[in-house]
Amino acid sequence: MSTTTTDSTSPTGEIGRDRRRKEDARLITGRTRWTDNITLPGMLHLAMVRSTSAHARITAVRTDAAKAAVNVVDVFTGADLADTVGVCINAWPITPDQKTPTHPPIATDRVVFAGEIVAVVVARSAAAARDAAELVEVDYEELPAVVDLADAERNQVLAHPDLGTNRSAYWKFDSAEAGTGGSVEAAIAEARTTGVVIEREFRQQRLIPSFMEPRSVVVDPTGEQITVWSATQIPHILRFALAATTGVSESKIRVIAPDVGGGFGGKLQQTPEEMVAFAVARRLAQPVKYTETRSESLLSAHHGRDQIQRMTLAATTDGRVTGLKVELAANLGAYVALVGGGVPVLGAFMFNAIYKFPAYHFGVTTYFTNTTWTDAYRGAGRPEATFAVERLMDELAAQLGEDPLVVRARNWITHEEFPFTTVSGLSYDSGNYELATEKAKALFGYDELRAEQARRRESGDPVQLGIGVSTFTEMCGLAPSRVLGTLDYGAGGWEHASIRVLATGKVEVVTGSSAHGQGHETAFSQIVADRLGVPFEDVEVLHGDTMIAPKGLDTYGSRSLVVGGEAIVRASDKVIDKARPIAAHLLEANPDDLEFVGGRFQVKGTAVAGVTIQEVAGATFVAHNLPEGTEPSLDADATFDPDNFSFPHGTHLCAVEVDTETGRVSLRKYSACDDVGVIINPLIVAGQVHGGLVQGIAQALWEGAQYDENGQLLTGSFVDYLLPTTADTISFDLDHTVSPASSNSLGAKGVGEAGTIASTPAVVNAIVDALRHLGVSNVAMPCTPYRVFQAIQQAVGQKSASGGNPS
Amino acid sequence: MIPAAFDYVAPTTLDEALASLSAHRDDVKILAGGQSLLPVLRMRLNEPGLLIDLGRIESLRGIRDDGDALVIGAMTTHHDVSASALVQEHALLISEAMTHLADPQVRHRGTFGGALSHADPAGDLCAPALALGATFVIASAGGSRTVDAGSFFTGLFETAIGEDEILAEVRIPKHTDWGARYEKFVQIAYQWSIVGVAATVQVEGGLFAAARVGLTNMGIVPLRAEATESSLVGQPATAETIAAAAALAADGTNPPSDLNGDADYRRHLARVLTGRALRAASGVA
């Protein structure tokens, strides 16, 4: 059973307060340590020579002209660096027989996607490096390239001919085999005779993460440790990967992720550029810097999504789902990236979403193509799952002629049924789908908009109104290490924190969750301020440097607050435990008689002032008068490994206007009621939801990476890869329900991905809803005006051909 | 994104600029606001040996009333054109198009003459200039000449400006009291036009006394929808007249096919948008 409160009472402490972010001044003005702002004495600059071919044998790399150019120090090819450059690893082989081609950071004899590094120029200035890179000549013997995922499935042209197949792995989950539910095939067979079967194929287009700060790396090999600054989400994982694949001792590598300008999963990677920079710096024993251009970023930083989803939903005629079968094809691109094939597997547990499906089957086949490698992108597997199931629930409702919210309510887990073990085997601890839906409907004005929709249909208005529903959930707080173990993931899911109480009573919080723009410093300060009873301003959060924060598993999967925040809570509690006997000693009281309230130790039931934890810190520092045998330190560490995921959920309602004369879609209204558990900082949560919504809406309407048949990226700049700005969005109406998570004492569930996961199907459902009376039942994403217009034309054409009335 | 090395001069008079130009004519690019040229240089799509920056030539800036025409200096920024009451009064179509042009940052750097000289078929100023019958004053060391809008746009990113010439100003015949509308069709705000329609009309006594319709991105150069224009003149300003005229808007066009749509879709858009632009310009519901 979950406790649900909906009143937002004004907070008494820091938790729940709208705190402006401590980070804002430096992040917004840019007066900070971005990696590219770092300049070291004697630093050299790198420029990459990248493959112009999607698949080719390298027959020659001629570097003489480049080496002779002004201010060029050296030029290295793949062959030059092969022994020292290491490899890019795959940390999540999803099956024991997964095919995982070696991924050299710099190609030696063959290139397998356009944009792969084939040579690196080292020069005394970035301009000289770029100029000389133009002088490197590479001879290619072209090989046939497989570009499209559907072509890869046919296995005729091979991305890696030596593997003999484009198929990397097949991973499945079946509820009948797992004992978590019935047989899907039986459910489908029964529905074919007595019920309803909905079969659809959806395409998750390829997306480009498009973080604001391009990737950048500086490597300084001149100290005792080799120091690597990188615009990365994962300094700790990068250090491990550098050490594991180059033979340099982990203790000889220091990785610093200074302020990092966004990632969205796109910087959850051990990149070839980092490996090449590391190798070159070691080779020359001089500091080097590499900062990519935006063009290079779009071309060669990992992409996301790119799946074909083949869905079969079985239901009774009264709208109860009896089974869901999912078969995915997922495009890995040219290599299995760090998490790579694991991304669709993360979605495997979420296709059943908020529903009590009695039978479920999930299978994914991962394929290689001669395209940029793919990996995590905001939501990673879960947006794909949510999209497909929420599209299907709308299709089911349409087929039955019922309201999509009513059909959902018939199938969802009710408030009283928590905790609930799902057909995919997860235990949902808390939620209240009824309340979130009720509040979202009220915000949205659902009934009024339905009435307007009916009027527009009736009058044949060229601008039709559609309403889309998305009742999403996701698994957050990655992740219980034991679960990761059962999935063959190559690491745990814990997080580490240290609290250092300084002589002046100020507090340093060290977290292994390295932020890249989320506001960790602010939210973590609020938690510690409340826990230790010290002023918010007295808390300093340190992160992103393996020397300062030696242990950590970084930031992704909405884990920082849920896992990293809980580690901070536990470390804080240890500080209080260490301070208590010292406080008792100072107060000449028995430790058991003390209470700790508002940052102050007091003898219970007395009005004596007591002593603050900051005063205890001073006494501990001088250590003049401590109890016998007491360690003179209040510092404490904690490592937290969650025993369950957290499960944010929400009801999102989107209204769109579709101009049937042009196909253009305009957002009319968007209302969302999310349950992200207990909210630490409402301002940060609103920002996360707003940004997330826009990113998910962008998948529905605008973004999509496109290649030509030769594997050349057509959307290689923001002229063609359409990234929305504020001018393209509307104001969102947001509300929350609060069902605290049970997996951490904060009750937080995570909010980093919620908006992105929920919004994409809400928008597409709205578009289809606007046009369904014309005969439209799907529009491929991104739903460009051209595609929407074609869908209308096709549907109207079919209707009139079959004697229907096209008006 | 680092451009190849180039030399740079920033003359303060048009004569100095023209002298530099004739000295280096085959290896030079003229830098106006740089909003199109700099990305081209940074992507190394062009590697000129010399950039002549017109930014310090004061005589090329400003908007003045010259009797029957407005004269807009080539180096006047989009922002200054869009903020101009003179333009609003006498060339409303230009003001209309300006509201759709790029974003505020670009409008503060980009220039009127620069955008027209760049002659991007998807740029938003060429069709309005054509529709308004602008004339282009082009300077060279030997003097200056005038070219009609109809002859100015000669091809894809090509104009009548010769190798030793610089666009100095654009004369726009006054269209005082004409209604105007620029319909720009894009997916996101900062995008180049998929199709744009620039319409300006003069309605007298309920009849169309005159109509001009320019089309953006319906060919390699901006086009006039001449069949639409001529079918309107003398007709009543009604939705029916406009619908019939708009149906002719794509006649004789040759639009591109790309990720945003094929040529047929663009022709369809041109017809729909022409109807909308004409209705708005003439105040017909």
Image (spheres, rainbow, N blue to C red):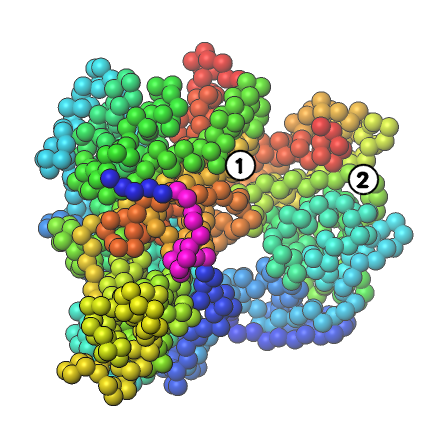
Q: Is residue B8 left or right of residue A137?
A: right
- Closer to the camera: disc 2 or disc 1? 1
| Vertical position of residue A688 compared to residue A554: above or below | above
Distance, label 2 to label 1, CA atoms, is: 33 Å
Q: Tell me which amino acid carries mark 1.
A: Arg
Residue at mark 1: chain: A
Q: Which residue is mark 2?
A: B178
Q: Which residue is mark 1?
A: A668
Residue at 19 percent across and 68 percent down: it is A592
Q: Which residues are magenta?
A: A6-18
Q: Residue at x 71, y 25 (%)?
A: B239
Place of residue A601 in the rendered image (x, y in percent of width and height, measured from the top left) = 29, 70
**What is the crowding at mark 1: few (fewer than 14 residues within 10 Å), some, or many (at least 20)?**
some
Residue at left offset 62%, top offset 75%: B8
Q: Nearer the viewer, residue A564 or B132?
A: A564
Residue A776 relative to residue A596: left or right: right
The numbered dot on residue B16 is none
A421 or B215, which is in the foreground?
A421
Badge 2: chain ID: B
Residue B171 place in picture, x, y as percent = 80, 53
- Tag 2: residue type? Trp
